[in-house]
Amino acid sequence: MMKVMSDEVEPGGEEAPFVADGLAAGAYNEEGVDLTLIRMFLRLTPAERLDEASSSANGIEELRALQVPASR
Amino acid sequence: MTFDFRRALTVLATHEVEFIVVGGISAILQGAPVVTLDLDIVHRRTPDNVRRLLAALRSIDARYRHDPRGLVPEAQHLLGPGHNLLQTTCGPLDALGAIDEGLSYDDLLPDSEEMRVGPDLTARVLSLRRLVELKAAAGRPKDVAVLPTLRATLVELERTRDA
């Protein structure tokens, strides 16, 4: 069985123990989708999400521009 | 090429165009962490709205992406149900007369809602639930690939609303 790294909870503490391994922490759903990304994105306003969309698309375009043509 | 989806929506709103945001940007606005390189809209195909849409598109130098002559859209193109795939100064913008075998602006309207997408900017957006249904029905590889993320976002969104 895989050993999960976790911090011990202080006696009397109410917080759930920290689990470093995202797989063990249930960060993914049954289809393998990373729910932490969705929760992060849901904390943004729609306006912020729209700006992120533009920023991501511009980032992809910048990476494309950096591509070195393959040598012949 | 520069992508500025907010500016594209602002231009459409300034020209009082009636449209519904569909596709990747509608998913993103509702919280789905996906990437898209174009803004897809379904516009209302009335003569007055097409006139306003044409004015908006001209202000951002819209031209057909797949035409080497750089042809600009005309009213007769936008009045039909076809997909007008355009390049603009705000990035790629697809003005869709209809989607999914004929669904028009009026067909999609009940499944859309106004969303604040900027300090003084609202846009009508297709609901994530409807988008998931349409993509599942379409069944194309590119739609199927994104469905797990869209479905998971829908679950999280509804869980958040219920909390």
Image (tube, coloured by chain):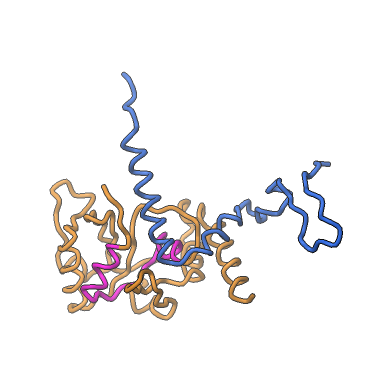
Chain colours: A blue, B orange
Q: Is residue B4 visible?
A: yes
Residue at 14% x, 58% y: name it. Answer: B72
In this rendered view, identify the residue nearer to me: B92 or B97. Answer: B92
Percent coordinates x, y for residue B123 in the rendering: 35, 73
**Which residue lies at the image location 58% right of the left edge and 61% below the top edge?**
B152
Asked whether residue A64 is drawn in magenta, I would say no
Residue B27: % across, % down: 45, 63
Left or right placement of residue B89 versus residue A5 in this view: left
Direction from residue B30 to residue B1 in the image, left or right: left
Task: Verify whether residue B27 appears in magenta.
Answer: yes
Magenta range is B7-29
Image quarter where the C terminus of chain B lies is: bottom right
Q: Can the viewer see residue B104?
A: no
Q: Is the magenta stretch mostly helix, strand or loop?
A: helix
Q: Nearer the viewer, residue A4 or A26?
A: A4
Residue B4 place in picture, x, y as percent? 30, 57
Residue at 27% x, 63% y: name it: B8
